Image (cartoon, rainbow, N blue to C red):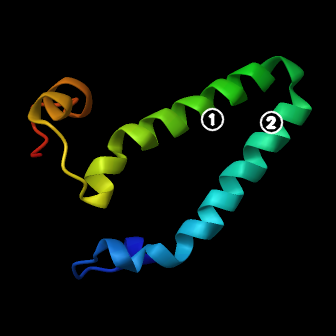
Amino acid sequence: PWILVERTTFIYHYFGSVPFITLMCVYSLVRVGQKHKKLKNAVYLYCALTVIVFLMFYPILSGHPVSVYFINKFLKWSNLWAM
């Protein structure tokens, strides 16, 4: 519902929908895995990659200090990103 708001919105406006989006994504992936048996491995791969990327960025999300090498080597995928 926040897409049509013309004023500035902040990340906390979206937090209320996060559980529902998460449940919808899990439900959709389970359905795809059940309906298309050939895509079951792709669903597992997607879930594994999602967990890996989350763990990579968790220090940034939680404010835990990490080395500059780790940020430049693994997290800074674009030179436009300010970290």
The one nearer the camera, 31 or 55, is 55
Label located before the other in sequence (2 or 1): 2
Residue at 88 percent of width and 22 percent of height: 37
Query: In which quadrant of the rendered view does residue 62 lie?
Result: bottom left
**Of the residues shown, which amino acid type is indicated by label 2?**
Val
Residue 41 is left or right of residue 21, and the answer is right
Image: 45 above or below 54: above
Distance Cα–Cα, label 2 vs label 1? 13 Å
Image: 35 above or below 83: above
Q: Which mark is residue 39?
A: none
Residue at 37 percent of width and 37 percent of height: 56
Residue pointed to by mark 2: 32
Residue 28 is left or right of residue 83, and the answer is right
Residue at 74 percent of width and 41 percent of height: 29
Badge 1 density bin: few <14, some 14–19, many ≥20, Cα 10 Å:
few
Residue 3 is left or right of residue 37, and the answer is left
The x and y percentages for residue 39 are 77, 22
Query: In which quadrant of the rendered view does residue 81 lie?
Result: top left
Q: Return the residue found at the far top.
A: 38
Q: Which element carries disc 2, helix, strand or loop?
A: helix
Residue pointed to by mark 1: 47
